[in-house]
Amino acid sequence: MHNFVSVDIAKCSGCRVCEFMCSMEKNGAFNPTKSRIRVVRIYPNTNAALNCRMCEDPACVGACPRDALKQSEETGAILVDENLCNGCGWCVQSCEFGAIIIDSTATARMCDKCSDRENGPACVEWCPEEALTLTTTDLISQKTRIEAVKEMANTES
């Protein structure tokens, strides 16, 4: 099970610091259009950050007609062979999380958890609300079950 950056929507203010820090880390400029994490407004008062979930069986890898995408067995990150990727966008369409962008060089880009960074993902480090964490789908499921049990107990009392 691979970990990925997850957002606690109860804490996310929609400030977009994660987008700015990601673009600075990966592109050397504060340009959120080049970020590999996206903040979206779900409801008037709810925001969520979307990025690569390091899926166990990533649809983007299977959708690539040029075999330009591979998944790292060690980290789960999707690796892009820049010599093979032509920016066709099939991976973008196949990702159910909206986590892939095609950059100005017509190359697919997605979160790699700042694998080259000693302190881990820049978005997690710089989130002023501490809404971003590294987690796994198992931990999210476990947390959801615990919260559901607590809610049921509160309703019964």
Image (cartoon, rainbow, N blue to C red):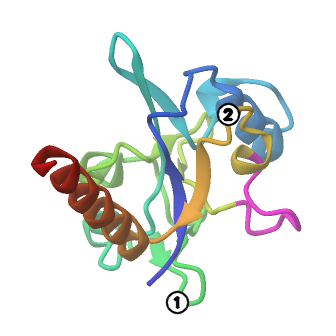
The residue singled out by tag 1 in the image is 73
Q: Is residue 2 visible?
A: yes
Mark 1 is surrounded, within 10 Å at the Cα level, by few (under 14), some (14 to 19) or many (20 or more) other residues, namely few
The foreground one among 109 and 44 is 44
Tag on residue 129? 2
Q: Which residues are magenta?
A: 114-122
Q: Main secondary structure of the magenta part?
A: loop
Instruction: Using the image, determine if residue 122 lies above or below residue 42.
Output: below
Is residue 120 rendered magenta in the image?
yes
Residue 40 placement (x, y as % from top left): 42, 25
Q: Is residue 42 left or right of residue 109?
A: left
The foreground one among 113 and 156 is 156
Q: Nearer the viewer, mark 1 or mark 2?
A: 2
Q: CA distance from mark 1 to mark 2?
A: 31 Å
Q: Which element carries disc 1, helix, strand or loop?
A: loop
Q: Residue at x 71, y 28 (%)?
A: 17
| Quadrant in the picture for residue 32 | top right
Q: Residue furthest left?
A: 156
Q: What kind of residue is marked 1?
A: Glu
Is residue 106 rendered magenta in the image?
no
